[in-house]
Amino acid sequence: MESIHIVTTCSDKYTKPLAVMLTSLVLNKKSQNPVKIYVIDGGISPLNKYKLVLALQKYQIPIHFLIIDSSVFNGFRIIGYFGKENYFRILIPQLLELDVNKAIYLDSDIILKEDVTELWNTNIDNYCLAAVEDPAALDRCAPLSIPPQFKYFNSGVLVFNVIKWRENNLSDKIMHYTRSNPFKVLYMDQDALNANLFDKWLKLDPKWNFQTSYLINPILHKIKPAIIHYTTANKPWTTGHPLQYEYYRYLSMTAWND
């Protein structure tokens, strides 16, 4: 049976929400497909690594920590509360084993409410990745020279066609673009990904990345989310969030439940 490859990135300060996200993923997966979880290490302390492993140990799911040379991102633009680890996802296809042809990337500040297998089964044979449109950032298209007939996606939930990325050397191309256009990439890796892949991505149902901006949209707020994404600086563990009860529900099942 095919394994589902899940990749995420994490700094030390995001280990608690990452544990919550992974717990929600495991508890809502109904299929028999095994899950392989990879965490790109952005400076996680030994104690927090132990607690992350402990969070999934009772489900018999190991965590594979991937080490990356973060110096390759020196000089890249950093904004707001984001960190250098946001750029790590650009290199995901290079970090995975050669027999991995597909992978799902998930931000740590999300909650899964449905079986990730459905997302995994999305056919992306003809695309480099699948993602959900970001209606709060459509003003980024013109500065990135994205033609008006195309949309802009949020990079918090991505389904990678690893084969196409490797065949087209996309990681290197996007890294080069980011390094060469420091004043264009306002939203960091998300801008770089959109600028290079605007005509190469499959639009997913918005339920797979229910962003905070949806809550004030008269149409989108009616969507039943399969994934809640706590976009913006208003997180359940900082200033609060209208959907924070979902976060605290799964937090109580982790090693951070005290």
Image (cartoon, helix red, strand yellow):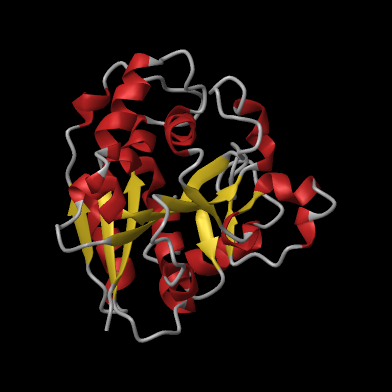
State the residue in front, 125 or 252: 125
Q: Which residue is at 25% across, 79% downward? A: 60
Looking at the image, which residue sits at the far left? 98
Residue at 76 percent across and 55 percent down: it is: 220
Image check: 236 left or right of 156? right
Depth check: give the residue in front, 22 or 73: 73
**Left or right relative to 111: residue 163:** left
In-front residue for pair 176/243: 176
Left or right: 219, with 113 as reference point: right
Q: Is residue 112 above or below residue 11?
A: below
> Up-down: is 100 above or below 4?
above
Quadrant position of residue 258: bottom left
Estimate the x, y position of residue 18 in percent, counting from the top left. Answer: 40, 55
Q: Position of residue 205 (x, y in %)?
A: 62, 61
Which residue is at 42% across, 61% downward?
124
At a point 45% along the width and 28% down the height, the residue shown is 188
| Relative to 128, 163 lies left or right | left
Q: Is residue 154 or residue 16 the one in the foreground? A: 154
Measuring from the top left, give residue 107's x and y in whole percent.
Answer: 44, 50
Residue 219, x across and y down, in percent: 82, 55
- Kindly tell me whether residue 29 is visible in this rendering: yes
